[in-house]
């Protein structure tokens, strides 16, 4: 964290957000949400010492700040996605996922249950891709699931000549699933979305093709 290095940083971050919002008021250009999304994430780190009243933070605490700020940005992106016709939520989704998924992925864990939970969260991100019609979720979720499966392959075939073959087979299998999904994406999405109850359909944002 850049704590107390320059007191003007927080002011610069606020000014950046205000300037981007003013620009959006006069120019309907979705890319202007990119500096807002990045600045919100960075501001969360600069506000942390003020909110908690302490200057030093452990690596774990820093990662949790990233996770929660990412979730907050994703929530804002979802609300904007439901209220606007133009795609003003894309960059918020991207930076929110970078903060949330990045914080989770870098965390150290010696527990296999925590690693399994990490895999389930990534599967949930892939499901969110279908629900929100946002491919960026399936990209992050797919990388996370691949990382977990690679961990399992390493544990099963540790110190074995079969390890490179297992990892290669795993990679080829994921590539095949990706190609299969790409070719049959509309059918798969339509089939899965038909299973959703009506109230969940109402929570979906406007789909842009």
Image (cartoon, rainbow, N blue to C red):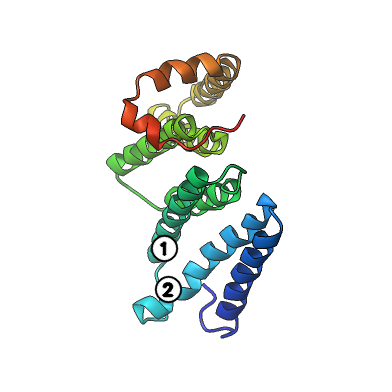
**SS class of the residue under badge 2?**
helix
Residue depicted at x 46% and y 26%: 160
* Residue 199, quarter of picture: top left
Whether residue 71 is visible: yes
Query: In the rendered view of the protein, which quadrant contains the C terminus?
Result: top right
Viewer-proximal residue among 92 and 41: 92
**SS class of the residue under badge 1?**
helix
The Cα–Cα distance between marks 2 and 1, rounded to whole angstroms, is 8 Å
Residue depicted at x 36% and y 82%: 53
**Position of 55 relative to 135 (above/below):** below
Q: Position of residue 188 (x, y in %)?
A: 48, 16
The circle on residue 6 is none
Callout 2 touching callout 1 (CB < 8 Å): yes
**Position of 106 relative to 196 (above/below):** below
Give the mark nearer the N terminus: 2 vs 1.
Answer: 2
| Residue that label 1 marks | 65
Outermost residue to the front: 26
Residue depicted at x 55% and y 24%: 171
* Dot 1 crowding, Cα within 10 Å, few <14, some 14–19, many 20+: some
Asked whether, in this view, residue 60 is left or right of residue 77, the answer is left
* Residue 38, quarter of picture: bottom right
Residue depicted at x 60% and y 15%: 183
* Residue 117, quarter of picture: top left
The circle on residue 48 is 2
Q: Position of residue 11 (x, y in %)?
A: 58, 80
Asked whether, in this view, residue 117 is left or right of residue 10, the answer is left
How many numbered discs, if any? 2
Q: Position of residue 139 (x, y in %)?
A: 55, 35
């Amino acid at each position: 964290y850049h704590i107390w290095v320059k007191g003007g940083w927080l002011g610069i971050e606020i000014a950046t957000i205000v300037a981007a919002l003013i620009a959006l008021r006069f120019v309907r250009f979705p890319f202007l949400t990119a500096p807002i999304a990045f600045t919100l994430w960075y501001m969360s780190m600069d506000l942390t010492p003020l909110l908690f009243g302490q200057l030093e933070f452990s690596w774990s605490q820093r990662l949790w700040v990233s996770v929660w700020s990412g979730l907050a940005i994703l929530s804002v992106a979802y609300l904007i996605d439901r209220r606007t016709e133009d795609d003003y939520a894309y960059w918020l989704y991207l930076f929110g996922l970078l903060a949330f998924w990045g914080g989770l992925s870098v965390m150290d864990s010696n527990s296999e249950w925590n690693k399994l939970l990490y895999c389930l969260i990534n599967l949930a991100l892939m499901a969110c891709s279908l629900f929100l019609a946002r491919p960026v979720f399936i990209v992050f979720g797919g990388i996370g699931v691949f990382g977990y499966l690679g961990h399992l392959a390493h544990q099963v075939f540790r110190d074995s000549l079969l390890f490179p073959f297992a990892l290669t087979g795993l990679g080829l299998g994921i590539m095949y699933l990706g190609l299969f999904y790409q070719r049959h994406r509309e059918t798969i999405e339509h089939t899965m979305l038909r299973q959703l109850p009506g109230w969940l359909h109402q929570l979906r944002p406007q789909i842009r093709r």
